[in-house]
Image (tube, helix red, strand yellow):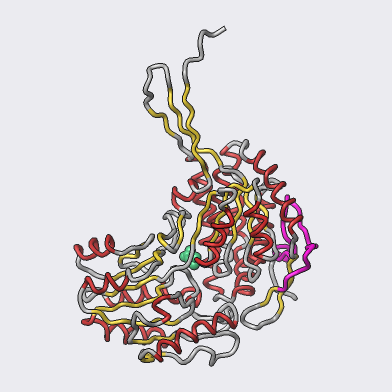
Amino acid sequence: MDIALQDSRLFRQACYSNGEWVSDGNAGSIEVVNPATDEVIGRVPSLDEGQVSASIAAAAEGFASWRKMSVADRSACLRRWFELMHEHKEDLARIMTLEQGKPISESLGEIDYAASYIEWFTEEAKRGYGEVIPAVKANQRIVVRPEPVGVSVAITPWNFPAAMITRKAAAALAAGCSMLVKPSSLTPFSALALAELGERAGLPAGVFSVLTGSSSVIGEVFTQSTTVKKLSFTGSTEVGRKLMAMCADNLHKLSLELGGNAPFVVFDDADLDLAVKGALAAKFRNTGQTCICPNRFLVQAGVHDAFVDKLSAALSEFKVGDGFAEDVKQTSLINADAVKKVQRHYDDALEHGAKVVLGERPGALANNRVAPIVLTGLTADMQIWQEETFGPLAPVMKFDSEQEGIDAANDTPFGLAAYFYASNNDRVWRVSEALQAGMVGANEGGISNAMAPFGGIDQSGFGREGGRQGMAEYQQLKYVCFGESGPTM
Ligand code: SIN
């Protein structure tokens, strides 16, 4: 298939292991489909256990040399990778829209976002500070030094095919680790394009590899390997739990960015225009397929109707179509199962008394497309209250007191993100402290950036990506107690 890139070498139908492109998978190959057309856009090899194990062994060698390189050299390599992403931004975005479906403007935005993690960790690489601690005895010195954990692996999702890789890989490489990535089989080409650019940037063999194939095969080898020291996963809570159990034997260090069920609370004193702007940005980005998407809109009685009207009016202007079409805001969901899930939540909500303010039953449009939907009358007995929808469906509940709003927001075992809008300063502080989530947007719908520690609590997992905390996930502390060396010879 001709995908019309300026640099056709960025579209690799091979995986990248130990600095080499491998097009033969011992377990066959996997077809990758454009969700907007159901057309096959290419194939990637499906590696077997032996091929994955060989790649891990190469990553151990890559680690041994990478950790010894000076921080300045490692950082220069990462900076070149970042620059190459910008130079090839248009092609990378095109590959992403083809395999993932998101609007091309959002793909371009994701390439910037993904590259910003490399830039951030390029700088953080130089700041791997340790500590010198006053010792108990006069002739002792206590030095604490962060060291790279070693070979790291990442299992990444399809919703952000580039950013979910760079925020793990750049942190790992900055810390001095090597990394093997297993991207989603739905969107491997963005990951492989990153590997191509990493190779051009001069990342040594074995330092960054992208392995394609079955999640269960690769996941099993990753978790059973004693060479692997760290696993980072972004995906569902169900799979995260399984991976954690599988890592128990080898006590791999873990970061798990799991499911969310974010509340978006609008209080009576909120600026409604700002709240609607925040809702559009947070909920409808990536056609609602984001872990930090608001899943439940909770609106105080005094502004409920006005907020619903303004939100619906803004959404009725949203153009739904192909990711490459101009001005398109909402595109295809990743596949037919994703549409069915939104449909199930919609049907269940209506059975439990919800009213449709905007939109129609999911499934009516061709090409896995779903236009924005606004429902009122959300209640806690609906499926949508308990599970993330991962689609452009905004259900709204009306509440009376501030405490009622906070309690409803916290009525979930997930704790990834939460958003609220209010103007009273005391309330802003109070609510930001009361919401139980790893990330809170206080009058802000766009909370993702490389400088901040992204991550959740409770059933949304643990570990942080980005910020100065992101690199620490790939480090372990070594404490050295220096005693007396005795008389010098
Ligand atoms: C996610 O959906 O897991 C990531 C979203 C983001 O980085 O903003």
Question: Is residue 112 among the parts visible in the rendering?
Answer: no
Q: Residue 260 versus residue 40: which sits nearer the camera?
A: 260
Q: Residue at x 41, y 61 (%)?
A: 458
For residue 46, above or below residue 333: above
Judged left or right of residue 133, residue 118 is: right
Q: Quadrant of residue 427?
A: bottom left
Q: Quadrant of the C terminus?
A: top right
Q: How far from the left and from the top, in percent, is residue 388?
A: 45, 74
Q: How far from the left and from the top, in percent, is residue 223?
A: 62, 54
Q: Assess whether residue 10 is covered by the magenta stretch.
A: yes
Q: Quadrant of residue 460?
A: bottom left
Q: Residue at x 78, y 63 (%)?
A: 25
Q: How far from the left and from the top, in percent, is residue 367?
A: 60, 86
Q: Assess whether residue 333 is covered by the magenta stretch.
A: no
What segment is highlighted magenta in the picture?
A: 7-31
Judged left or right of residue 467, residue 276 is: left
Judged left or right of residue 100, residue 256 is: left
Q: Quadrant of residue 445?
A: bottom left
Q: Residue 26 versus residue 183: which sits nearer the camera?
A: 26
Q: Residue at x 69, y 66 (%)?
A: 214
Q: Residue 161 versus residue 28: which sits nearer the camera?
A: 28
